[in-house]
Image (tube, rainbow, N blue to C red):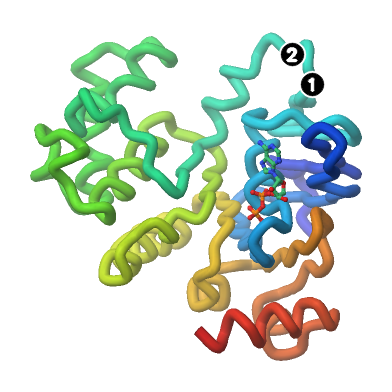
Amino acid sequence: MNSAAPIIEMKNVSKWYGSYRALTDVNLSVYEGEKIVVCGPSGSGKSTMIRTLNWLEAHQEGDILVNGIRLHRQMRNIAEVRMDVGMVFQHFNLFPHMTVLQNLMAGPVWVRGIPEAEARANAMTYLERVRIPEQADKYPGQLSGGQQQRVAIARSLCMKPRVMLFDEPTSALDPEMVSEVLDTMIELANDGMTMVCVTHEMGFARSVADRVIFMDAGQVIEENTPAEFFDNPRHERTRLFLSQILQH
Ligand code: ADP
């Protein structure tokens, strides 16, 4: 076990949407450099769980600490927390009226107060890292889905986050574009980024994850190494899920 404090800590977190309980006593610690894959059936609470980590959804019970800062209703420094926590969504969420470069510069200039020239140079560095520097002056609508998702990843990286959250980043893509986004994520993982990824890409989970979290009905049912998770799952529900998903 890592002796440093975790970057993310969830302790007995529960969340309701009205009277519907979406999360029940979720516990999770993510340490620097770790790659966590979260999987489970549709509606099991994966997206809700990951969205509580940067306060896109509020939890009602338990504690969430990000870099040691406790997330709660009265907090004033949520922008500060979000700067450390990058998020990549299923549907990219790029600004359609801004070029790729402008999308990448917006956060650093507006939120971090970085001078434009520095933000531009930084943005180009990250576009090169996701291998699409030649797309800098295009608008998102002129790019393929895979390219847009790589822009979204670069945009997050421009904020120099300590941890990156991915919420099904490949599930809205045409099949032929999935691998280019997964390759970008693998490179990021190899560079040592701390990552929490909700994904159905079990090949990615097997090769990249340090730990796999399996959720069902708002609960963490199993937390395991990929080798154990896939070859020797502890729970019947995990086995059932794997048998269904690996058939496809
Ligand atoms: P997953 O990511 O595993 O598919 P979600 O976290 O999206 O699951 O959803 C968990 C449960 O919470 C589902 O039953 C879903 O219908 C419900 N839910 C999600 N978002 C909302 C919302 N904004 N309002 C009400 N119910 C929601």
Residue at 82% in and 37% down: 16
**Front-lying residue, 103 or 175:** 175
- The N terminus is located in which quarter? bottom right
Where is residue 177 drawn, in percent x and y?
A: 28, 65
Against 145, residue 142 (above or below) is: above
Judge left or right: residue 83 versus residue 21. Answer: left
Q: Which residue is mark 2?
A: 75
Q: Secondary structure at mark 2?
A: loop
Label 2 close to label 1 by CB (< 8 Å): yes
How many numbered badges does the structure rendering display? 2
Residue at 44% in and 33% down: 160
Mark 2 vs ligand 1: CB below 8 Å: no
Residue at 33% in and 15% down: 109
Checking the image for residue 72, the label placed there is 1
- Between the residue at mark 2 and the residue at mark 1, the CA separation in whole angstroms equals 6 Å
Give the amino acid type for the residue marked by disc 1 in the picture: His
